[in-house]
Image: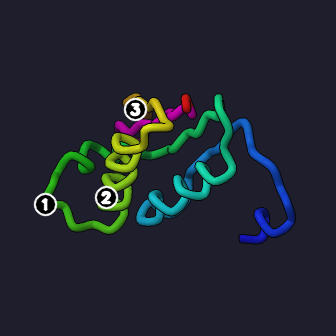
């Protein structure tokens, strides 16, 4: 990872809004560059409710679901998700804070 090789320190804020199937990898990256108090936001995590459909095989849905599983299992983080409603239907974002 080039940032790590260049000696880049930690960030105060991370924003995850790329291909959803790789959300778990992006969260790992965000944690690598986090410190106590760092906030990480992940966008587009409700996906019209499809993320709660356990049999949904869409890679983006699975990646988002894996993100939630990682957030729940990560003792360094406190996290919540908020649903939003707009012209594109309903979706939402997740907010996680490094607490340990």
Q: Is residue 99 above or below residue 27?
A: above
Label 1 crowd (10 A; few <14 / some 14-19 / many >=20): few
38 or 15: which is nearer to us?
A: 38
Q: Is residue 42 above or below residue 7?
A: above
11 or 82: which is nearer to us?
A: 11
First-in-chain label (3 vs 1):
1
In the image, what residue occupies the spot 25% across and 43% down?
A: 49
- The residue beneath circle 1 is 55
Q: Read off the magenta span.
A: 87-98
Marks 1 and 2 sit apart, C-alpha to C-alpha, by: 10 Å
The answer to whether residue 97 is visible is yes
Label number found at residue 61: 2
Please tell me how many numbered marks the rendered image carries: 3
48 or 81: which is nearer to us?
A: 81
Q: Quadrant for residue 3, please give it.
A: bottom right
First-in-chain label (2 vs 3):
2
Q: Position of residue 87 (x, y in %)?
A: 43, 36
Q: Position of residue 61 (x, y in %)?
A: 31, 58
- Does residue 93 appear to the left or right of 8 in the view shown? left
Q: Position of residue 56 (x, y in %)?
A: 19, 61
In the image, what residue occupies the spot 55% across and 32% down?
A: 100
The answer to whether residue 84 is visible is no
Label 3 crowd (10 A; few <14 / some 14-19 / many >=20): some
Label number found at residue 92: none
- The residue beneath circle 3 is 81
Check the picture and name the quadrant holding the N terminus: bottom right
Q: Position of residue 85 (x, y in %)?
A: 39, 30
Which secondary structure class fits the magenta region best? strand
Q: Is residue 69 above or below residue 4?
A: above
Residue 23 among those drawn in magenta:
no
């Amino acid at each position: 990872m080039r940032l790590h090789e260049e000696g880049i320190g930690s960030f105060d804020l991370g924003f995850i809004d790329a291909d959803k199937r790789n959300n778990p990898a992006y969260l790992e990256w965000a944690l690598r560059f986090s410190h106590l108090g760092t906030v990480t936001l992940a966008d587009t995590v409700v996906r019209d409710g499809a993320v709660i459909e356990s049999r949904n095989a869409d890679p983006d849905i699975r990646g988002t679901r894996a993100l939630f599983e990682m957030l729940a299992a990560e003792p360094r983080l406190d996290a919540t998700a908020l649903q939003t409603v707009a012209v594109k239907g309903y979706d939402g974002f997740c907010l996680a804070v490094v607490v340990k």
